[in-house]
Image (cartoon, rainbow, N blue to C red):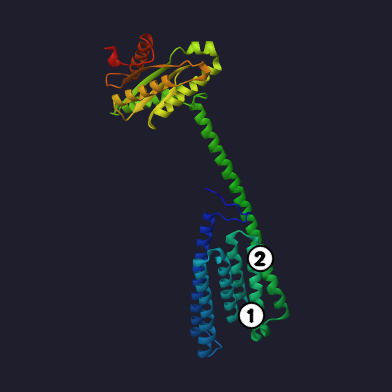
Amino acid sequence: MKIPNLHSNHIPTGYEFKHSKWIKKMLRAYWVVVLTHVVIQIGCFQFLDYDRTPEDFMIHVLFWPTLASTLAILIASWVEHHFSSVSFYSMSIASTIIAWTIIHVNYDIRIILAICLLPIFASVLFFSKKRVWMVCLMQIIGYLIVLCEPTYRLYLSSFDMVSIPAFLIVGTYVAQLIVTSGVEVLDDLQASMLAKQDLIVRNAIMSKESKTDGLTKLYNQSSFKDYYEKAFEYATNGMSLHLALMDIDNFKSINDTYGHQVGDTILERVSLVIQENITSSDIAARYGGEEFALLMFEQSFEQAYAMVEQIRKKIARSVHKELEGSYITVSVGLKSYSPHLTKDTLFEEVDACLYTAKRTGKNKTMTSLDLV
């Protein structure tokens, strides 16, 4: 989960999508407000004492206010669909028109003024103090426009004229505090998520380092034994499994003649050849000093044999300038799983094949078939 940087002028695409979704929800909520106002007005006209004639009620209470509110929502919806970058402003203007239209129609109900806070608190959803104060300015402009209506102006006392803007400013200040608090919470959440991600990465690196050999980047002996045990279980249930052991010939003389640093370079190059020639489902490990182990799956014995031969021949053809023109070779022992074998006897028989390859000339692959 990526938390957007709320202090940046750039809003990530995913965050823009959420803004669009919130705006659509708010526009749907405004339809409910307009419909509710119409229903309440009709109910009041039918069942309460209403000081307007039917014609005045239909034109000035229902038709024109509802038309103005409906057009405001429709235009805001069109802007949201075609110009999403300014959809917040069109939504805020629409909510301002709806709020002050309702206030103008019901100016004799003092509590109705509270509806002008609707656009302000709707802007809180977007976590921007500038936007909150901008919407406050819209409400003050709406108030001044309505104030131009003589009937409404006469209804207000001097105290009302001062207290309404003060009411808007205090409400906006409270909304700003909510935004500030929300931003701080999201910043803390972002910091927490980043710390958690860093911890996950560190744990993954440590886990990998504990399973791999630092020099060759192949699996180490401990992790190979774990994989070998699991692979043997799968093999007993019908999966093909081939085990190969590979040893660099005359490696001690390389260390003695050219030094351990050159020896490490040779180990790295051999491991690279192995990695480049096995499949993604195979497992390669540095089993000992200059010995490597391979677990091969999902292939026939002939294919496994061809693979280790390809590795052996590539190593034999490689040129190493550190060895002054000399070549290195490897000997290989290979055997497939069969039902009569345990994991220990399979390993022992492959090791015997490797020993035979070393003893009978080196630079060759020996299998159990060669020993028969």
Q: Residues within 10 Å of mark 2 (few under 14, many from 20)?
A: some
Residue 177 position in % (x across, y down):
66, 59
Vertical comparison of 193 with 81: above or below: above
Task: Look at the numbered disc 2 and give the secondary structure of its residue.
Answer: helix
Residue ID at (63%, 64%):
132
Could you tell me residue 214's position as x and y percent? 52, 25
168 or 79, nearer to the observer: 79
Distance CA(mark 1)–CA(mark 2): 20 Å
- Relative to 138, say whether 147 is above or below: below
N-terminal of the two: label 1 or label 2? 2
Nearest the viewer among 208 and 95 is 208
Numbered label attached to residue 133: 2
Q: Residue at x 27, y 21 (%)?
A: 339
Vertical side of 233 occupied by 65: above or below? below
* Amino acid on which disc 1 is placed: Val
- Tell me the element at label 1: helix
The residue where tag 1 is placed is 146
